[in-house]
Amino acid sequence: MCTLILAWQVFDGAPIAAAANRDEATDRPSRPPGLLDRDPAVVAPQDEEAGGTWIGYNDAGVFVAVTNRRADVQGERSRGLLVRDALARPSAAEAASFVRNELADREYAGFNLVIADDEEAGLLEWDGILRTTHFDPGVHVVVNEGHNGDAAKAASVRQAVSVMPEMTVEEWLDRAAEVLRDHELAVCVHGEDYGTRSSSLVTVETEGRGRYWFADGRPCETEYEVVADGDDADGQF
């Protein structure tokens, strides 16, 4: 996934709102979002090649998402499995602690990992050296090259998805979806063997319930569909 937008502690009742495009090889198989794990319950898509995921949330209200990071480090294990393991934790703090311990034990290729719940949010950047950034309430954008003002693309996207006064989370997600379709900002990527494969819109409410809209294709060509709702699945999501 190459563009991740997070609005953290911006909207009442929904401390986490996220919008993301996944850029990947066109022949890499994946499954759309669903109930990926049960203890805790995790809603996420699945990479069929390695078994991991790139974005998801659990019923404790923990949200985790990853983008690649260009770095001269090799990985013995899929970064998507790291996301899946982090989503098994009951809080953002415990998920971040797990990732730090995991990096001490095993090798991973470079990544930018966002972890959030209703109490804290942050970015773990790995390129052979681990750097941690704690997010303040607001909108944050992560791309392969970095986040917010550290990367020109991230800064442009962040400006485009800024929150207007009185804007609701639904209105903001509509705006974010427009940006995810954008070609001038190089957010929706078209390529012969590589490009934007899918797009996700996610909210996680204060009680840990989530909502997930998924476009199973380029968002400029594919409609978002509801794949998980807080009032469905026996009230868990």
Image: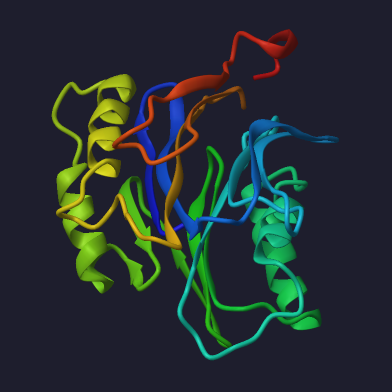
Q: Quadrant of residue 60?
A: top right
Most extreme residue toward the front is: 192
Side (left or right) of 195 relative to 55: left
Q: Residue at x 65, y 61 (%)?
A: 96
Q: Residue at x 22, y 53 (%)?
A: 157
Most extreme residue toward the bottom is: 72
Q: Where does the image place residue 92, in percent across and percent down from the top left?
A: 62, 50
Q: Residue at x 28, y 62 (%)?
A: 148
| Quadrant including the C terminus | top right
Between 75 and 163, the one nearer to me in the picture: 75
Side (left or right) of 169 relative to 113: left
Rendering colour mode: rainbow
Q: Where does the image place residue 114, in percent across and percent down from the top left?
A: 51, 56
Q: Residue at x 62, y 38 (%)?
A: 57
Q: Is residue 203 above or below residue 226?
A: below
Most extreme residue toward the right is: 39
Q: How many marks?
A: 0
Q: Is residue 176 above or below residue 139?
A: above
Q: Is residue 170 above or below residue 177?
A: above
Q: Where does the image place residue 2, in percent across and percent down from the top left?
A: 41, 59
Q: Quadrant of residue 76?
A: bottom right
Q: Where does the image place residue 225, in percent across and percent down from the top left?
A: 47, 21
Between 147 and 214, the one nearer to me in the picture: 214
